[in-house]
Structures are given as structure tokens and as C-alpha cells.
Image (cartoon, rainbow, N blue to C red):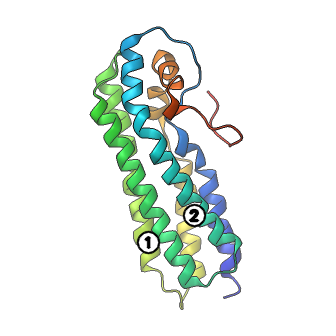
């Protein structure tokens, strides 16, 4: 299908536009003296790194499918599997924040609840994208359907992540930045803090 390649590239571009969501739990500074915050951050960050790696691998598979001249069926399989993986990773991140308990900051319980809610919401939205891709017919209007998925993905990338920003701000953000699992990888496009 000749038109699939540009649409799949559109999907990859939309996904990279939402890449900021991948590392929302990485901190922005590196000095802090609160042991309780450090302990809380360690609980969360120990579980962040493998999930971020899963999200990156899924993003890479979508990007790879868009760069190669794959059949609509192969694109559908790659995208479906990637969205499933991303959905699962965000659910695991939500569980990590939930399991760590309320962070030792003002309104910690609310900060935690809001962050867990956002992460679960992201998980659900990526599960919805998987469902949308699974329903596409590779032989009929595939490009149009894929374009709709790419549009939805672009909207998802522009979505609010206020609770996650709050989670990674201030002293708590500083504590998270010190943890190995939450350190920003060098040489990648990440949100600055």
C-alpha cells in the first residue's frame, strides 16, 4: 500500500511528540537533604527505569515500522504490540507510585493520588489506542484508520500532566533526581526541569 508509509511516519512523529510523557518521573536537580524524601524516591525510582526502557523499546518499534516499507498487517501488529507494552508500563509506574505511599511533602497524599490517577489514565489511553489499531482492517481504509490513531496519539502527547510535574518538582524532584532509576539518560530528548 503506497499511502501507508506517510501515515505510519505521521504515527511515529505523533509518538515522538508525546515522548515527554515517557520521562515525566525523572527529576530536575541533584541536591537534597531529606532522608525520608530520598527513601520515598528510591522506592519509586527503582521501579521506574525498567518501565521507561519498555516504553522506549515500544516507541522504537513503532518508529522502526514507520521507517521500513512494511505491509499494513506488519504495521498493525507492531503498533498493537507497542501500545500494549506502553499501556502496561504506565500501569506499572502507577503501581510503583501507589505502592511507595504518600511522599513526605505538603499534601503528599494528594500528590500521590493525582500522579497515580494520571499514570493510570495514560495506561488506559494507550490500551484504547491498541484497541483502535486492532480494529483496523489492513485491506480496507487502513491509512485512514492509522491517521486517526496518529491524531489521537498526538492529542495524548499534548495532554496535561500537571500531577506528574508536581510529583517531580521541589524537594521531592531533587530527591528523585539523585536516584539511579530516575536519572535522565544522556543524549536523549527529555523534559527540562
Q: Residue furthest top?
A: 33
Which element type, helix, strand or loop, lies under badge 1?
helix
* Residue with the mark numbered 2: 151
Does 86 sit left or right of 5 as displayed?
Answer: left
Q: Nearer the viewer, mark 1 or mark 2?
A: 1
Does 121 sit left or right of 166 as displayed?
Answer: left
Write the residue at 59% across / 66% down. Answer: 62
Write the residue at 66% across / 88% down. Answer: 1
Q: Nearer the viewer, residue 171 or 161?
A: 171
Which quadrant of the rendered structure holds the C terminus?
A: top right
Disc 2 crowd, CA 10 A, few/some/many (<14, 14-19, 20+): some
Disc 1 crowd, CA 10 A, few/some/many (<14, 14-19, 20+): some
Q: In the image, residue 157 lies at what x, y percent?
A: 55, 50
Q: Nearer the viewer, residue 174 or 142?
A: 174
The tag on residue 132 is 1
Quarter where residue 126 is shown: bottom left
Quarter where residue 144 is shown: bottom right
Which element type, helix, strand or loop, lies under badge 2?
helix
Real-space CA distance between mark 1 and mark 2, rounded to the nearest whole angstrom = 12 Å
Q: In the image, residue 61 lies at what x, y percent?
A: 58, 65
Amino acid at each position: 500500500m503506497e499511502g501507508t508509509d506517510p501515515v505510519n511516519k505521521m504515527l511515529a512523529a505523533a509518538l515522538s511528540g508525546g515522548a515527554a510523557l515517557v520521562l515525566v518521573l525523572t527529576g530536575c536537580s541533584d541536591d537534597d537533604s531529606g532522608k525520608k524524601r530520598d527513601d520515598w524516591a528510591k522506592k519509586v525510582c527503582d521501579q521506574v527505569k525498567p518501565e521507561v526502557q519498555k516504553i522506549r523499546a515500544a516507541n522504537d518499534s513503532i518508529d522502526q515500522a514507520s521507517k521500513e516499507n512494511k505491509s499494513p498487517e506488519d504495521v498493525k501488529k507492531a503498533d498493537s504490540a507497542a501500545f500494549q507494552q506502553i499501556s502496561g508500563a504506565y500501569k506499572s509506574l502507577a503501581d510503583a507510585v501507589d505502592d511507595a505511599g504518600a511522599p513526605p511533602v505538603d499534601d503528599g497524599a494528594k500528590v500521590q493520588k493525582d500522579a497515580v490517577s494520571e499514570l493510570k489514565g495514560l495506561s488506559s489511553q494507550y490500551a484504547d489506542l491498541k484497541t483502535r489499531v486492532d480494529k483496523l482492517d489492513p485491506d480496507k481504509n487502513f491509512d485512514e484508520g492509522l491517521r486517526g490513531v496518529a491524531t489521537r496519539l498526538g492529542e495524548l502527547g499534548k495532554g496535561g500532566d500537571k500531577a506528574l510535574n508536581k510529583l517531580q518538582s521541589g524537594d521531592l524532584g531533587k530527591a528523585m533526581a539523585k536516584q539511579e532509576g530516575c536519572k535522565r539518560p544522556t543524549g536523549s530528548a527529555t523534559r527540562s526541569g
